[in-house]
Image (cartoon, helix red, strand yellow):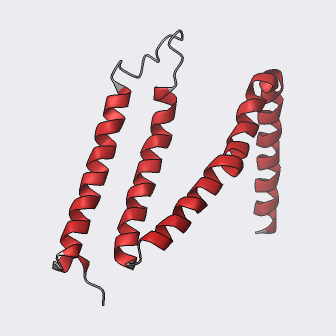
C-alpha cells in the first residue's frame, strides 16, 4: 500500500509540474483569472451572501419559509453565475461556435421568473396550511 501511495504521489507531482511548465508562457494572461476569482469572491460575494442571510434571518421568522426563500436565492445565484460569461461576452469577439446566438438576458430573466414563481407558489400553499409544508 505504501508503494502505491508513493507511486501516486510521484505521478501527481509530475503531472502538476508539467501543467505548471505549460502554464508559464501564458502566465501573464492567466494570472488575473487565477487571482481575480478568489479576490472577487472574498471581497464581494461572501460579504453580500452573509448580509442577505442576516437580513433574511431577521425579516422571515418562519423556518420553512426562510428555507424556501434561501433555496430560491441559491438557485438564482447559480443561474446568474452560469449566465455571466454569456451576458458579458465582448460584442467584438467572435461568438463561440458551440453557443448558438440567442437572447441570453431574456433567457436568464425567464429562468429567474420560473424559479421565483415556483417559490411564491410554494409559499402561498404553505401560508394556507396545505400539507406540502407542515412542521413536525
Quarter of the C terminus within the rendering: bottom left
At 32% across and 30% down in the image, what residue appears?
A: 106
Q: Left or right? Give the position of 72 relative to 49.
A: left
At 81% across and 23% down in the image, what residue appears?
A: 28
At 18% across and 80% down in the image, what residue appears?
A: 129
Q: Position of residue 60 (x, y in %)?
A: 41, 72
Seen from this angle, which residue lies furthest front?
59
How many numbered discs, if any? Answer: 0
Q: Nearer the viewer, residue 33 or 130?
A: 130
Quarter of the N terminus within the rendering: bottom right
Q: Position of residue 67 (x, y in %)?
A: 40, 70
Q: Position of residue 36 (x, y in %)?
A: 72, 37
At 47% across and 39% down in the image, what residue appears?
A: 82
Q: Position of residue 126 (x, y in %)?
A: 23, 74
In the rendered image of this protein, does residue 86 appear above or below residue 113? Answer: above
In the rendered image of this protein, does residue 35 appear above or below residue 6? Answer: above
Q: Left or right? Give the position of 9 relative to 98.
A: right
Location of residue 27 by image quarter: top right
Seen from this angle, which residue lies furthest bottom?
136
Q: Nearer the viewer, residue 45 or 25?
A: 45
Q: Left or right? Give the position of 118 relative to 85.
A: left
Amino acid at each position: 500500500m505504501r508503494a502505491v501511495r508513493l507511486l501516486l504521489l510521484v505521478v501527481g507531482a509530475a503531472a502538476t509540474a508539467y501543467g505548471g511548465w505549460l502554464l508559464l508562457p501564458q502566465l501573464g494572461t492567466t494570472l488575473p483569472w487565477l487571482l481575480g476569482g478568489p479576490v472577487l469572491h472574498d471581497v464581494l460575494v461572501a460579504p453580500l451572501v452573509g448580509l442577505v442571510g442576516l437580513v433574511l434571518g431577521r425579516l422571515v421568522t418562519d423556518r420553512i419559509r426562510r428555507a424556501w426563500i434561501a433555496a430560491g436565492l441559491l438557485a438564482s445565484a447559480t443561474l446568474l453565475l452560469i449566465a455571466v460569461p454569456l451576458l458579458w461576452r465582448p460584442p467584438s469577439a467572435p461568438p463561440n461556435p458551440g453557443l448558438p446566438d440567442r437572447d441570453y438576458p431574456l433567457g436568464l430573466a425567464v429562468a429567474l421568473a420560473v424559479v421565483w414563481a415556483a417559490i411564491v407558489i410554494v409559499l402561498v400553499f404553505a401560508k394556507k396550511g396545505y400539507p406540502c409544508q407542515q412542521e413536525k
